[in-house]
Amino acid sequence: MLDVEYRLRNAAEARFCWFQARAVPVREADGAIREWLGTSTDIDNLRSLQEQQRVMVAELQHRTRNLIAVVTGIAQETLAQTGPGAAFAAQFEDRLAALSRVQGLLSRSAEAPITIEALVRMELRALAIHELATNARKYGALATARGALAVGWHIRIDAAEGADDGRRWLVMDWVETEPDPVRAEAGRAGRRGYGRELIEEALPFALGARTRYELDLRGVRCRIELPLDRRAVEEVCP
């Protein structure tokens, strides 16, 4: 029996293409080979798809490890803040729910294929916004009916590069106005919680984001600039 894969040069396209040859002998009653029957199949597209699959599986494994690291980090940080018990369970479940909501949105997206990289990036963004909202509700502008929260966003293209070739950024501004700065400052006193660490450390490291977080008697002012193309990510986070 013959089963072999080989390449032949396609002169018209000036490239080598993969083929698979299979053959089996047809034997006489005494076992002597009378002839061979076989096929030659063009498997070039199949080999290309198999290579793409191999790369995607490797990328999936890499990104899954990153995602598990995110969940582990959430658990460790929440445990450090709350200790074991009901408080840990509540906060950990709340943060995992933020990840779950993003997963639900992605499952209903039909505009374009969602890569694992895009999934992780969206989950980190969602967590950052979730933590800002949670802190605002507990200690900031949303903790009282007289507080104010303004959230704005826009797309910025780096002017130095020009409109056609510039790095594109999603810029989000989160501005809280405190009606009672003394109460708000007391509530946040000594706190550098998970949300701020996520914004100031995790987003720049994992997504190549640019962030600024300011907390004073006026309230919270946070700007998050997220790269919208791979070149911007590589420029900030090579």
Image (tube, helix red, strand yellow):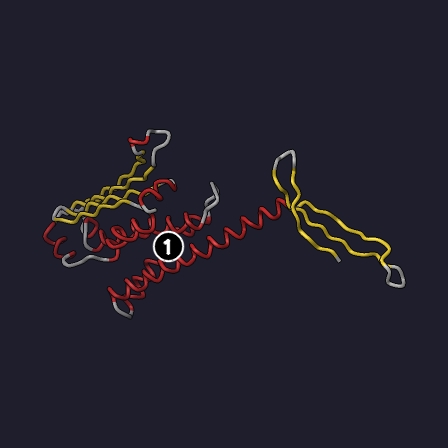
Q: Indicate the quadrant where residue 79 lies.
A: bottom left
Q: Indicate the quadrant where residue 32 lies.
A: bottom right
The location of residue 215, given as percent across then percent down, is 16, 49
Q: Is residue 218 left or right of residue 100?
A: left
Residue sitting at 58 percent across and 46 percent down? 48
Dot 1 crowding, Cα within 10 Å, few <14, some 14–19, many 20+: many
Q: Is residue 147 left or right of residue 121?
A: left
The location of residue 3, given as percent across then percent down, is 71, 55
Residue sitting at 55 percent across and 49 percent down? 51
In the rendered view of the protein, which quadrant contains the N terminus? bottom right
Q: Nearer the viewer, residue 194 or 161?
A: 161
Residue most extreme to the bottom: 85
The location of residue 219, given as percent across then percent down, is 16, 47
Which amino acid, mark 1? Leu
Disc 1 secondary structure class: helix
Residue sitting at 67 percent across and 47 percent down? 19
**Count the marks: how many?**
1
Residue most extreme to the left: 182
Q: Indicate the quadrant where residue 167 lies.
A: top left
Q: Measured along the vertical axis of the image, is residue 203 above or below residue 164?
A: below
Q: Nearer the viewer, residue 191 or 19?
A: 19
Q: Measured along the vertical axis of the image, is residue 220 above or below residue 28?
A: above
Residue indicated by mark 1: 99
The location of residue 81, given as percent across then percent down, is 24, 64
Residue sitting at 58 percent across and 50 percent down? 50
